[in-house]
Image (cartoon, rainbow, N blue to C red):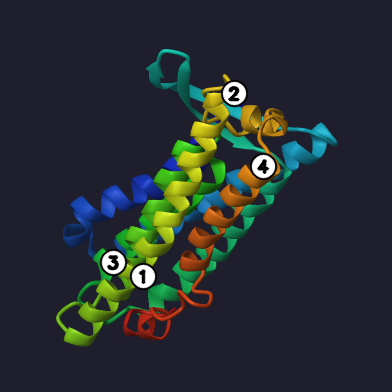
Amino acid sequence: MEGWLIWILLAPLLGFLINVFTGSRIGRRGVGLIACGAVAVSFLLSVGAFRALLAAGEGGVLTQRLYTWIKAGALSVDFTLRVDPLSGLMILVVTGVGLLIHIYSVGYMAKDPGYARYFAYLNLFTFSMLLLVLGSNLLLLFVGWEGVGLCSYLLIGFWFERKSAARAGKKAFIVNRIGDFGFIVGLSLLFWSLGRSGVWTLDFTTIAANMEKLGPETITAIALLLFVGAVGKSAQIPLYVWLPDAMEGPTP
């Protein structure tokens, strides 16, 4: 049990909240320091988590269970953070690259009147990506996934006073919902199929341990539906049409 893992997630969320509620009063310097500092804290903690994984050796996993979110019959969904070798590497990428983007944005957006709003969105984006990566179950993954989609919409339509930017934001939002439909159906099919075999769970570890209970056709269908979601989010053919219009937003 690693009690500090939550701060990897909370640091950018706190940066978002501070800049939302006080950004107009603390000035541009304060906004930049809070936004960059929040992601820097998250990055340093991510480095610590990765080092702890290396020290734990092969098969090492860090977890922090916060509370039981949903309890319904045989189904129990915990708000638990999990760092394994894959997610440990990904949080380094998210926070490391995110920190560089935040630092570059201090100069890139220096004269923009929406300075505080931009950094609030960027902190929220980082939080959503970290929730997607650190969540130990499908529900947390989905919340983070949709948070990333929301932040993409907000940033693409950042200069919403321009009609072209507003249209670009809506286009990205709608096309991503097409991909997300496949993603939701895939998650639902996975949950329902395991439930029929007597395993009502959303937890990744339990799902992995019971995949042999599903037939190859079911597994293929689930994989393809989840792939549709990934295609939409990463702007692959044929759900790439929103990507050129994304240049209407800030591109640090």
The numbered mark at residue 50 is none
Q: Is residue 3 left or right of residue 148?
A: right
Q: Compared to 94, does 68 lie above or below?
A: above
The numbered mark at residue 154 is 3
Query: Label 1, label 4: how many angstroms apart (C-alpha)?
Result: 38 Å
Indicate the quadrant where residue 116 lies.
bottom left
Q: Residue at x 57, y 52 (%)?
A: 43
The numbered mark at residue 175 is 1
**Residue type for callout 4:** Gly
Q: Are marks 2 and 1 in contact (CB under 8 Å)?
A: no
Q: Position of residue 42 (x, y in %)?
A: 52, 48
In the image, 90 versus 95, the foreground residue is 90
**Residue type for callout 2:** Ser
Of circles 2 and 3, the one toward us is 2
Q: Which residue position is annotated with label 2?
A: 197
- Say which label, 2 or 1, has the lower sequence index: 1
